[in-house]
Structures are given as C-alpha cells and as structure tokens.
Image (cartoon, grey):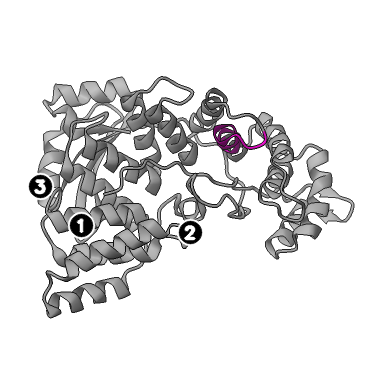
Amino acid sequence: MRSLLRSLLLGPAFAVCLLARAEGGTLDDAVHTYELGDFAGAFAAIQPFAEQGSAKAQALLGAMFFNGQGVPRDFGEALTWFQKAATQGDVASENQLGLMYCKGLGAPQDYAKAAQWYRIAADRDDPTAEVNLGLLYYEGQGVPQDYAQALAWYLRSAAHGNAAAEYNIGLMVAAGRGAPQDSAKAAHWWSLAAAQGSADAQNNLGAAYASGKGAPRDLVAAYKWFSLAALGYPEDDSADREQAFRNRAIVAARMTPAQLDAAKHLVSTWSATTSPTSAQVASAAPPTRSLASPPRPSPARALPARREITVQIGSYASEAAAQRRLRDAAPLPEGARAEVSATTGAAARFYRVLVTGFANPEAAAAFCAARGFAAAACWIY
C-alpha cells in the first residue's frame, strides 16, 4: 500500500478579460490563439497585455515560460511574471509561486516562501493551495511539522472535492496521524478519491477490499480497483503500475471464473465522477512527474465569500442510519443547516450527515461536544 503524500503541481487556471484590447485584437483573441495551439502567435499577442498590467495576461505569460510554449522554457522569467500577477491578487499565480519556491524553480528552494504563497492562496479557498500547504505541514517544510494542521488543510481542500486531499486524508487516518487510526474511514476517503480517478487511491482501496481491512472483503471490488489503478498510472510511473498489476494477479488467482467476469465488466463500464475541482485534478502533476501539463484558460470567477464551517457527523452505509444521526444533531444552532448527503464510493453508496453554518471551527467543536459526539466522529471542514 502506498504511503507517499503527494502535492498537486498545477499550472494556473486563467481567466479571460473580454474587454482588454491592444493593437491587433483583444486578450480574448489572444487566448483563443493559445487554445488553438499556436503558442508562438499567442505569446506575441499576449505579451503586450501583460506589459500593460493585465494580471491574467501576466499569469498566462508566466505559464508559457514555465511550460516552454512559444518560447524556450525559462523558470526565472516564469517566476517574474507570476509575481507580477500574484501582486495583483491572481490566486492561481499565488499557488504557482508556492510551487516554484517549493521545488526551487527559477529561484533557490525556500520552503518558508512556498508556505507563505500557498497560505495566501489557501486563505482565498484555493483547493490546490490548501492541499499543498497541508503537505508542507505534514513534512515540516517551511512550517513546524503539525499533523493536525496538515489534516485541517486537507479537509478544507476535500470540502471542494479535491481528490489529492481525499487521498492524503485516507493516508493520515490509516496511519493515525492527526486523527485516531481508523481503517474504515481511510477506505471511505480513498473511495471518494478513487471515484474521481486517483490511481493511488484506487490501488489502496483495492488493498482494503482484498484484505478486508477497512472494507468488507470483496475480491471482485479489489480486482476492479487494482485494474483501474494499473490503467490510471502514467507511463513514466511504471513501478506503481506494475505493482497494481501484481496486486491484481494475486487477487485473480483466488477468484472463480464468474467473479472474474463480473469484475472485468465493472472495469469496462466504469467512468470517473466529476467534482467542483475535477478539471484541476485531472491536469495536475505530482512532484515526481512532468511539470509540462499546459494550463487551460477558464471563465473569470469572482472572489469567493468567506467560507462557512461545516461539520460531518460520520459516514453511514444506509440512509436510515444517517437520518437517525441527523435527528440526534437537533436542535441546530441559529443559522445552521443540516442535510444527509449521498456519495457514491467504491462498490457502495455512503451517506454523510453535514451541518453547515458555523462561524469558526471552535463553534463547530462546541456543537459536537454538547451533543456527546465523539471527536473521532466529527470532521470539521
């Protein structure tokens, strides 16, 4: 079972300024040229907007230097343009600066500066920055090692549907770091990440089903998830892919022909679910993999409002059990809202009890304590 925590390394998500105009067209025209793959033409068209002070153009120019698109790769130039965009509040550039200082790209490696930039973006609810900051707390790089802080940032990111955060939460719960050891909770978090296509989570979930540790022993489900993991690892991660294939072979040797047929059908019909951040997760690359994934422009988005705190009170195999727990949560504090949220996991459906509307984590913790809910059963996002 893999135990490596991974950070998302992601090129910025670029907003398009529809009204900006320079000689030769709008920034929208320049971005369209980029999308068509004419990087040299896009670079020439975007550069004037960047020099005129457009944060979005500066961020995209930084990405083109970072990825070597239309211009030779130059991390120093990329860092310069990301800094220009970040000082104007471009959240993706803030996260990208954290990445570059973390990896020593374009500047000497500086974990403290990486943490500083990740925190700026994370405080604006950027899920990629949240999971990256969590990793620094886990490793004790640039900040004191603090498993509780690492878990807290992963949970914030997971609340946005970030698969890497869900996978890392599973690892921490499985090891009892930052939270009591709980194999069932670990398998639950891996099931959420696996459903989004995380090969690492799929491999760990397969192991849970094969061993019966954290999930009911189910060879069909184990074969399915080992197969998907093997197919999901990139070509340059041959060691992990081969291990997943070996795991599948061990399980297959214990299965009947009917079980094998059922498992293969599940593999052939499976498709990843989507989440609010699934597009980012799909194009992300962990630190041991290529950094050349080209960023994709996206529509402009407003700065998010201050985030409410949510408490998850357990995860249940049946809706009836979740509804009973929901009744136990009454009465709710003024302004709070409660619901049962259904989530399709590995080979089953989970029901989570969510209470939203707390002003801060302390109020959420007091709510759990007042109702006698064990700390291990209350997840505060």
Q: Quadrant of the C terminus?
A: top left
Does 266 appear above or below 5?
Answer: below
Callout 3 amino acid = Ala
User: Do labels 1 and 2 touch, CB within 8 Å?
Assistant: no
Question: With 214 as the anchor, is 159 left or right in this view?
Answer: right
Instruction: Check if residue 155 falls in the magenta segment.
Output: no
Mark 1 and mark 2: Cα distance apart in space: 33 Å
- Read off the magenta span: 95-106
Q: Nearer the viewer, mark 3 or mark 1?
A: 1
Q: Which mark is residue 236?
A: 2
Percent coordinates x, y for residue 240 in the rendering = 36, 56
Residue at x 25% of width, y 76% of height: 265
* Element assignment for label 1: strand
Residue at x 72% of width, y 44% of height: 74
Q: Is residue 117 at all visible to an observer of this figure?
A: yes
Mark 3 and mark 2: Cα distance apart in space: 44 Å
Dot 3 surroundings within 10 Å: few (below 14), some, or many (20 or more)?
some
Mark toward the start of the polypeptide (3 vs 2): 2
Callout 1 amino acid = Arg
* Element assignment for label 2: loop
Percent coordinates x, y for residue 221 in the rendering = 19, 64
Query: Which residue is identified by label 3?
Result: 321
